[in-house]
Image (cartoon, grey):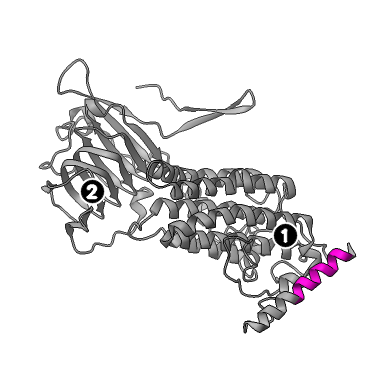
Amino acid sequence: MEAALVERLEAAVARLEAAVASGASLASAAPRDLDVPAALDPAIVAYDEFVAEAVGRLMAAAEKIGGKVLDATKVLAEAFAVAKDLLVQAKQLQKPASMADAQDFFKPLSDVIAKATAMTEGRRPDYFNHLKSVADSLPALAWVAFLGKDCGMSFPTAHVEESWQMAEFYNNKVLVEYRNKDPDHVEWAKALKDLYMPGLRDYVKKHYPLGPAWGPAACAPASQPKAAAPTPKASASKAPPPPAPPSAPLFTTEKSPKSSKPKEGMSAVFQEISSKPVTAGLRKVTDDMKTKNRADRSGVVSNTAAAPATPEKTSRAGSFSFKSGPPKLELQMGRKWVVENQVGKKTLAIDDCDSRQSVYVYGCKDSVLQVNGKVNNITVDKCTKFGIVFKDVVAAFEVVNCNGVEVQCQGTAPTVSIDNTSGCQLYLSKESLGASITSAKSSEINVMVPSGATDGDWVEHALPQQYIHSFKDGQFITSPVSHSGA
């Protein structure tokens, strides 16, 4: 043990001398190396080895890709470095009594996660699926905030698994998109998955199954963490160095004692519901309001009929801020058709297109677009009451963050993806019945297919949005909820 301590101290001195020679401050090189007991903690040593291998592999793949993918991967490396810093400092601090008491301590991790999320916001950036994979995976590191079974979180191992499921949807998109195009992107996606599953999951299961190890009660409270130095830049071949010291919250949920203060959030909602008659405010459904008696349901996307005058439903997709900019319908760089901010235009059309081009539709409302030709892929993003008719796509058709869209495929489409969308009517031709339809965080999805018995008729199929999960024979069996009754 003495030999190991001497070796660590010698390494610390060497790093300090190197920092002075390069003009860096002593504080930026000293804290982690001089904390010898923490550095020799087997769990921390194992963490360094795990991060050096797993994050190093991911960073190596990202450097081959460059651009925003590399930027997002650097943020991920920073997050893993922050998590290590929290684990080291936790052993020298009291265990917080509640999540509210630990908000300041966990804030650095919360800030890094927010940084990754900000990279996916606004107009859909290049390599969106890569960025979303990173942003949606980083909440897995919140396992370091597990304070016990009553803290409102799953146990650490389960939390990592659940968090990865959120990111896997977009990570699989990267794999599918680049499977036969670019092995560097495929390697990046595989490295990201291996980082969490089984990497982080197995590490947490082995070393911290019940959460971080906290110091004795005599230590300083976690709300007053020790100051640490700024985070050096992460390297692709080494474990990310220590980040800035924790000083603020990961979660904003707060449990407080009962008081006379008015209830907020869901408590206020349930209180209001319980204080009123159950049927208060409901309107009687008359015959002319029933779907079967409505003349505006023609069965195909129409470029003349206006959208039904029904009240807009509030949904996750409808909660996005809609900022209208100048309308566009143009071909950019000869490869990408951009249709933006079109409002009330029922006769939009793209005629001169080919299979190497893509179509990106953003921020359109109460409009209809017709794509007359084969294109590589089509994406409809943040549109409301929008209709689109297209013939053939080579790769995929995607609907993201939309509310009330109608889609008609007159030719073939191997993949249809619907994400974070409320209200989608999808009309498939006979040639496109083999399409693979993927949906996530969406509701009210109806697929219309041509009837085999009568030409011109459509048969409607509602895709399930509720599921039952049953534990049988050592695994969970998932099946859609079936509703009965008239």
Is residue 38 positioned above or below 396 on the image?
A: below
Give the numbered dot on residue 97. 1
Q: What element carries label 1?
A: loop
Tag 1: residue type? Ala
Apparent side of residue 375 relative to residue 62 in the rendered image (left or right) = left
Q: Mark 2 points at which residue?
A: 357
In percent of width and height, residue 400 lies at 34, 47
**How much space separates mark 2 and mark 1, taking CA atoms?**
57 Å
User: Of marks 2 and 1, which one's residue comes earlier in the chain?
Assistant: 1
Tag 2: residue type? Gln
Could one spot residue 52 in this view of the protein? yes
Is residue 85 positioned above or below 10 on the image?
A: above
Q: Residue at x 18, y 31 (%)?
A: 299
Q: In which quarter of the image is residue 127?
A: bottom left
Q: In which quarter of the image is the C terminus?
A: top left
Q: Quadrant of the N terminus?
A: bottom right
* Number of callouts: 2
Could one spot residue 249 in this view of the protein? no
Q: Main structural element of the magenta stretch: helix, strand or loop?
A: helix
CB under 8 Å between discs 2 and 1: no
The crowd level at tag 1 (other Cα within 10 Å; few <14, some 14-19, many 20+) is few
Chain part drawn in magenta: 3-13
Q: Which residue is drawn at 55% across and 47% down?
A: 163
Q: Quadrant of residue 180?
A: top left
Apparent side of residue 266 relative to residue 393 in the rendered image (left or right) = right
